Image: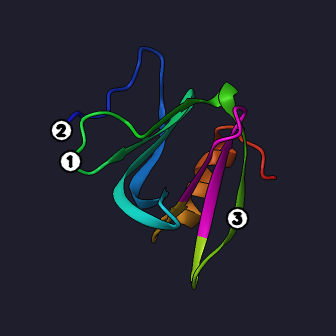
Amino acid sequence: MAKFQLAPGETMIGSGQLALHQKQFLNTKPFSGNIYVTNQRACFYISMVGSPEMDLPLSEIKGFSVGKKALFTAVTIHSQAGESYVFTGFPVKKLQDWLRQAGVPEL
């Protein structure tokens, strides 16, 4: 399993364990992993997978939105390319704060 590495000049804002919901045929399936938000990017590694599932420089993030996924609060990160990454889990409220600290606008 690959380990998250900070780039030179990069500062960690926050990290935690979340679930990324990815489309699987007609449904979505949650994948547990770790999210890292720095002053330069947001990155998500699925547990036991060597490469990041999401690694977006802040300049490529359009913004984030907050909603519901079943009974849970969900944070969706929207990329400039039109991709959406939906996260749920205990630290989603913290994720909102980390993204705001990084300068990502709430949509």
CB under 8 Å between callouts 1 and 2? yes
The verdict on residue 82 being magenta is yes
Q: Is residue 62 left or right of residue 12?
A: right
Q: Is residue 7 left or right of residue 98?
A: left
Image: magenta residue range: 74-86
Q: Nearer the viewer, residue 8 or 41?
A: 41
Q: Which residue is mark 1?
A: 48
Q: Is residue 96 left or right of residue 89?
A: right
Which of pointers 2 and 3 lies earlier in the amino acid sequence?
Answer: 2
Percent of width and height locating residue 90? 45, 71
Mark 1 Cα within 10 Å, few/some/many (few <14, many 20+)? Answer: few
Percent of width and height locating residue 20? 46, 57
Residues at marks 1 and 3, CA–CA distance in whole angstroms: 27 Å
Which of pointers 1 and 2 lies earlier in the amino acid sequence?
Answer: 2
The amino acid type, in three-letter code, at marker 2 is Met
Measured along the vertical axis of the image, is residue 57 above or below residue 18? Answer: above
What residue do we see at 38% from left, 25% from top? 6
The verdict on residue 78 being magenta is yes
Mark 2 Cα within 10 Å, few/some/many (few <14, many 20+)? Answer: few
Q: Residue furthest bottom?
A: 71
Measured along the vertical axis of the image, is residue 74 above or below residue 100? Answer: below
Q: Which residue is mark 2?
A: 1
Q: Which residue is mark 3?
A: 66
CB under 8 Å between callouts 2 and 3? no
Q: Residue furthest front?
A: 25
Percent of width and height locating residue 100? 69, 47
The amino acid type, in three-letter code, at marker 1 is Met
